[in-house]
Image (cartoon, grey):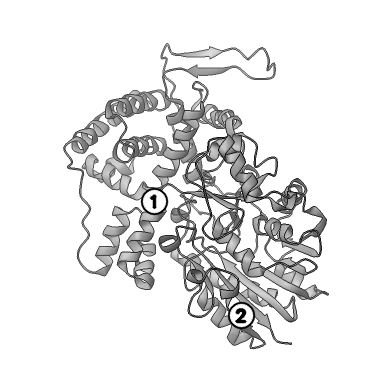
């Protein structure tokens, strides 16, 4: 999903996005830099978090000569006793929490990503472990995603077992990550406690100091005893509304403001179901690349060859759902070949509402990274024109490269511009205008594990103002009788229905065109909008409205 980074008054690009292929992404999210952390416009490797790096003189740690086949590779310390998945997970968690990196659950590089991750370990901790195998890569994905999701609950357990808040608050950041990983593996993955304790202690001693290993040993052993006797520290969920929200936020590991907001809009039962969905391991959908003449049946055949479990979409042709096996798809090259794209069905529904027809002129106002752009282009069948506008020139370049790969470049033209400026200077009015707006991303928290901790209540007001500005700008591009489609990957009414209602008050020349002609009835709201709900539909949460400009 796209991350729009901006300070108070202007946009700026995010250099971390080079790690994410546009074909893997379908949503569009706004990321506000954390003032207390490294700016996300800088790579973590160039501005690392500082913490003690005392390397033990363990005989298992040695200097390995450069590989004969790689003469430029530097020598480095190799530790064969430290668990590779645990070292990589701890460093990645540090990068995510303090360095502005993203917890992207998909890695388009497949097996090659292991060496990249080990490079971060070496630069951060001062040593390497053995190389990651396929099992290690899967564990890293599971452990990093799960530890981030359950961070608030894990911290509750750690603090309870420390018996002294000052001990917990004074821990080095790396030590906290090692403990979180250990607590997650014991409480949520049911890994053998003795193995988790042993490997966590070893990492703490080597990467930090012997005393850190002793502390990890004592706390994790306490946890193992409590887990065995089914007597983990309880979370109280009682009292007034605020106290209940605080308890639920800890129990289900979400920010308190989100719990209060969802309880207000959806009720407590639905809020709990929504948090449960966000904490579950995410499923993904693949879209067959019809731009290359491929069909859902072709995609199913390839998945059967790879022995990847799958099921057809209940709502869209040429979409297939996966619960597991995504790494197999990536490593087999299906994404790099342009055979298919990772795209949630909720994004596919938005394109269905646009309803691209051959010969039409369509503009995608906030196009990058381009998931919807590519899908719309494939629906034009080589006839018509699709203009992709975005403020990030680097992502537009990637979009063009992916469009060539998907063989739809002939109908796509990219425009590097801020929509608000572009719409003022425009000279063309389009048949259809898609504004897939920057939003909070509250509908995609199952896939974006870190997003819940990066979002703040104050962000919502800034987002609403930006969405109004972009809607006004997009409306200027619609020809009389043309169509404006507004969409988000959010479930929040203030970003969705309320933005449309406010827009219609400002622009009476537009009226709602109910979406029931374009999507299944169970996605259609009373006002004729499209709303996918994670609890109801088991898809990402998303919203779309179709508006027509009067003749």
Q: Are marks 1 and 2 in contact (CB under 8 Å)?
A: no
Secondary structure of residue under mark 2: loop
- Residue sitting nearer the eye, 107 or 338: 338
- Whole-percent x, y for residue 319 in the image: 58, 53
Q: CA distance from mark 1 to mark 2?
A: 35 Å
Task: Please give the name of the residue rendered at 77% of the width and 53% of the height, measured from the top-left corner.
Answer: 408
Task: Please give the name of the residue rendered at 22% of the width and 69% of the height, measured from the top-left corner.
Answer: 240
| Quarter of the view holding residue 169 | top left
Secondary structure of residue under mark 1: helix
User: Is 419 located above or below residue 67 in the figure?
Assistant: below
- Give the quadrant of the C terminus: bottom right
User: Which class describes the residues within 10 Å of circle 1: few (<14), some (14-19), or many (20+)?
Assistant: many
Q: Is residue 289 visible?
A: yes
- Whole-percent x, y for residue 141 in the image: 47, 38
Q: Which disc number belongs to residue 513?
A: 2
- Give the quadrant of the N terminus: bottom right
Task: Please give the name of the residue rendered at 40% of the width and 28% of the height, measured from the top-left corner.
Answer: 208
User: Is 364 located above or below residue 167 in the figure?
Assistant: below
Q: Is residue 192 left or right of residue 536?
A: left
Q: Is residue 64 left or right of residue 233?
A: right
- Whole-percent x, y for residue 270 in the image: 34, 65
Q: Which disc number belongs to residue 374?
A: none
| Pointer 1 or 2: first along the chain | 1
Which residue is disc 1 drawn over?
279
């Amino acid at each position: 999903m796209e991350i729009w980074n901006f300070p108070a008054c202007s946009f700026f690009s995010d250099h971390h996005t080079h790690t994410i292929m546009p074909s893997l992404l379908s949503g569009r999210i706004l990321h506000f830099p954390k003032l207390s952390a490294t700016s996300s416009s800088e790579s973590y490797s160039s501005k690392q978090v500082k913490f003690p790096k005392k390397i033990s003189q363990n005989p298992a740690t040695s200097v390995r000569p450069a590989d004969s086949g790689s003469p430029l590779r530097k020598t480095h310390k190799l530790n064969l006793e430290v668990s590779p998945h645990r070292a990589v997970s701890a460093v990645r968690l540090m990068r995510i929490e303090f360095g502005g990196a993203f917890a992207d659950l998909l890695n388009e590089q497949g097996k090659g990503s292991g060496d990249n991750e080990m490079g971060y370990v070496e630069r951060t901790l001062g040593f390497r472990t053995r190389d990651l195998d396929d099992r290690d890569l899967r564990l890293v994905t599971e452990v990093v995603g799960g530890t981030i999701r359950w961070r608030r609950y894990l911290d509750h357990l750690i603090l309870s077992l420390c018996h002294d808040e000052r001990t917990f608050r004074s821990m080095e950041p790396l030590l906290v990550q090692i403990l979180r990983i250990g607590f997650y593996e014991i409480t949520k993955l049911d890994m053998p406690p003795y193995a988790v304790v042993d490997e966590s202690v070893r990492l703490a001693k080597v990467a930090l100091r012997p005393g850190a290993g002793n502390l990890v040993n004592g706390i994790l052993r306490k946890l193992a005893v409590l887990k065995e006797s089914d007597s983990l520290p309880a979370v109280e969920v009682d009292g007034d509304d605020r106290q209940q929200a605080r308890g639920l936020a800890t129990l289900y590991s979400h920010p308190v403001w989100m719990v209060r907001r969802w309880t207000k809009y959806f009720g407590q039962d639905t809020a709990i179901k929504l948090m449960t969905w966000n904490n579950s391991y995410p499923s993904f959908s693949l879209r067959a690349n019809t731009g290359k003449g491929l069909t859902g049946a072709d995609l199913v055949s390839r998945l059967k060859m790879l022995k990847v479990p799958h099921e057809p979409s209940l709502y869209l042709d040429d979409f297939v759902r996966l619960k597991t096996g995504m790494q197999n798809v990536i490593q087999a090259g299906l994404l790099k070949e342009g055979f298919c794209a990772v795209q949630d069905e909720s994004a596919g529904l938005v394109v269905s509402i646009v309803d691209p027809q051959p010969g039409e002129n369509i503009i995608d106002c906030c196009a990058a990274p381009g998931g919807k752009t590519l899908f719309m282009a494939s629906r034009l069948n080589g006839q018509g024109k699709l203009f992709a506008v975005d403020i990030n020139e680097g992502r537009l370049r990637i979009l063009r490269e992916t469009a060539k790969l998907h063989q739809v470049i002939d109908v796509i033209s990219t425009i590097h511009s801020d929509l608000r400026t572009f719409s003022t200077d425009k000279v063309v009015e389009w048949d259809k205008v898609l504004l897939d707006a920057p939003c909070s991303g509250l509908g995609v928290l199952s896939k974006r594990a870190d997003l819940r901790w990066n979002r703040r209540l104050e962000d919502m007001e800034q987002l609403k103002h930006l969405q109004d500005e972009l809607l006004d700008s997009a409306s200027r591009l619609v020809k009389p009788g043309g169509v404006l489609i507004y969409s988000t990957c959010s479930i929040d009414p203030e970003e969705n229905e309320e933005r449309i209602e406010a827009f219609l008050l400002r622009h009476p020349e537009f009226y709602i065109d109910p979406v029931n002609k374009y999507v299944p009835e169970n996605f259609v709201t009373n006002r004729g909008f499209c709303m996918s709900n994670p609890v109801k539909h088991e898809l990402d949460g998303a919203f779309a409205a179709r508006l027509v400009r009067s003749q």
